[in-house]
Image: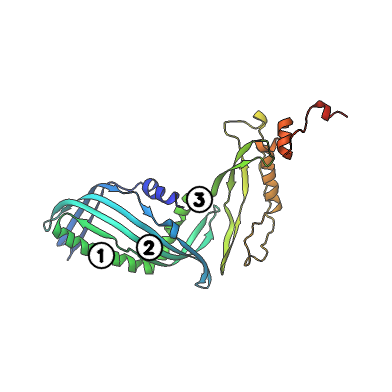
C-alpha cells in the first residue's frame, strides 16, 4: 500500500490540468465563473505507516475499523481566473491539504467476479490544517471563507452520505490495488543445488464473503496457482504442459480461529499447486556429482555410471 497509493494518486488517477466551475447567489444575480489552468500537483506525502486497523463489531455485525491518516502534505498549484462583474481577478492560487484524516468502518461483500466490495459505515473526515493561498488579498479573504465553508459542508455531509459515497469509490480502488486479485510469485526449487526457479500467478479471488469476528477475520480464497512459461509456447513445446486445474468445492473450516492465525488448504487446491510445480522448471531435477553433494550437504559423494551399476 505504501508503494501503490502514491503512484495511484500521482499517475494512475490522471488528474486534470484544467478545471472550471460556476456558482451564483440570489437567483444568479451574483454569479462567478472560475477557471483553473496550468494545474500542477506535488508528489503526495501519505501517512500510510500510521494506519491502524481493528477488527471489531458494530451495527450488529463484524467490521474492519480503519484509522487512516491519509495525507500529510499535498499541494495543488494553478492559475485562477474569475470572470465576473464583481471581484474579477487573475492570479496564482495554491491549495494545500495537510493532516487530512479519514476514519471509517467497513464490511466486505463478494461480487459476481470474486472481488470484495466494501460496505462502509460511520465515516469521519477531517481536513486538518488544509488551506487555500491566493495572491489577491481580497480574493484570498473571500475564497478563504468559501473554502472553509465548503470543508465544513463536506465534513458534515460525509457523516450522513459518506457510507454510500465511499462504498462505491472503494471497490474499484481496492481491485486496482490488489491487481484484480492476482499476484506473480517467484518460487525457487525446493531441492538444494538445483538453482532453478519459476514464476507462477497466484489467483486469490474470493469464493465467499469474509467473516469478521471480534479480533479475527476468516477469508475464503480460490488459491489457484497458475503456471505458464514466458514466451509464446504452444502446449508441449520445450517440454511445457498447461494442464488446467480442477478445483473441487471441498468443505473447509477453521480450527479455533479466535486463538491463532492459520492457513487451510483444500485437497484439490493442494493437488493443483503440486501439479503446477511439476509442469514448471522446478518440477525437473537435474543430477550430477556437484548437485548431489549440494543436495545432501556433503563433499566427496561420487556420481557416475559405476554408482548405479547393478
Q: Cα distance, mark 2 to mark 3? A: 23 Å
Task: Return the residue at label 3.
Answer: 178
Q: Residues within 10 Å of mark 1 (few under 14, many from 20)?
A: some
Mark 3, residues whose alpha carbon is within 10 Å: few (<14), some, or many (≥20)?
some
Residue at disc 1, secondary structure = helix
Label 2: which residue?
A: 101
Between 112 and 294, the one lying in front of the other is 294
Q: Are marks 3 and 1 in contact (CB under 8 Å)?
A: no
The residue depicted at 37 percent of the width and 69 percent of the height is: 159
Residue 189 position in % (x across, y down): 66, 40
Query: Which residue is outermost to the left?
Result: 85
Whether label 2 touches label 3, CB < 8 Å: no
Q: Dot 1 corresponds to which residue?
A: 148
Please identify, in this view, whether the residue under mark 1 or under mark 2 is nearer the observer: 2
**Picture mark count:** 3
Q: Nearer the viewer, residue 48 or 263?
A: 48
| 235 relative to 76 in the view: left or right | right
* 300 lies above or below 3: above
Mark 2: which secondary structure?
Answer: strand
Q: Is residue 108 visible?
A: yes
Q: Which residue is pictured at 48% across the width and 52% down the height? A: 175
N-term-proximal mark, 2 vs 3: 2
Residue placed furthest toward the front: 299
Amino acid at each position: 500500500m505504501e508503494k501503490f497509493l502514491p503512484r495511484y494518486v500521482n499517475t494512475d488517477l490522471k488528474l486534470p490540468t484544467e478545471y472550471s466551475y460556476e456558482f451564483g447567489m440570489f437567483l444568479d444575480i451574483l454569479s462567478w465563473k472560475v477557471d483553473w489552468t496550468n494545474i500542477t500537483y506535488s508528489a503526495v506525502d501519505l501517512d500510510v505507516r500510521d494506519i491502524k486497523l481493528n477488527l471489531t463489531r458494530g451495527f450488529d455485525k463484524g467490521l474492519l475499523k480503519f484509522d487512516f491518516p491519509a495525507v500529510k502534505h499535498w499541494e495543488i498549484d494553478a492559475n485562477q481566473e474569475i470572470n465576473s462583474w464583481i471581484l474579477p481577478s487573475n492570479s496564482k492560487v495554491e491549495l494545500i491539504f495537510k493532516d487530512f484524516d479519514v476514519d471509517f468502518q467497513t464490511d466486505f461483500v463478494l461480487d459476481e467476479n470474486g472481488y470484495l466490495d466494501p460496505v462502509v459505515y460511520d465515516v469521519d473526515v477531517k481536513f486538518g490544517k488544509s488551506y487555500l493561498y491566493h495572491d489577491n488579498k481580497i480574493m484570498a479573504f473571500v475564497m478563504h471563507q468559501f473554502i472553509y465553508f465548503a470543508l465544513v459542508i463536506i465534513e458534515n455531509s460525509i457523516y450522513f452520505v459518506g457510507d454510500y459515497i465511499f462504498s462505491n469509490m472503494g471497490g474499484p480502488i481496492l481491485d486496482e490495488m490488489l491487481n484484480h486479485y492476482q499476484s506473480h510469485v517467484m518460487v525457487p526449487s525446493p531441492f538444494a543445488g538445483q538453482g532453478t526457479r519459476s514464476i507462477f500467478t497466484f489467483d486469490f479471488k474470493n469464493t465467499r464473503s469474509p467473516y469478521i469476528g471480534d479480533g479475527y477475520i476468516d477469508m475464503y480464497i480460490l488459491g489457484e496457482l497458475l503456471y505458464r512459461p514466458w514466451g509464446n509456447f504452444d502446449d508441449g513445446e520445450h517440454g511445457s504442459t498447461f494442464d488446467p486445474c480442477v478445483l473441487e468445492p471441498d468443505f473447509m473450516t477453521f480450527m479455533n480461529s479466535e486463538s491463532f492465525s492459520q492457513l487451510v488448504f483444500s485437497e484439490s487446491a493442494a493437488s493443483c499447486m503440486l501439479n503446477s510445480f511439476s509442469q514448471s522448471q522446478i518440477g525437473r531435477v537435474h543430477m550430477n556429482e556437484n548437485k548431489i553433494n549440494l543436495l545432501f550437504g556433503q563433499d566427496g559423494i561420487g556420481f557416475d555410471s559405476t554408482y548405479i551399476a547393478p
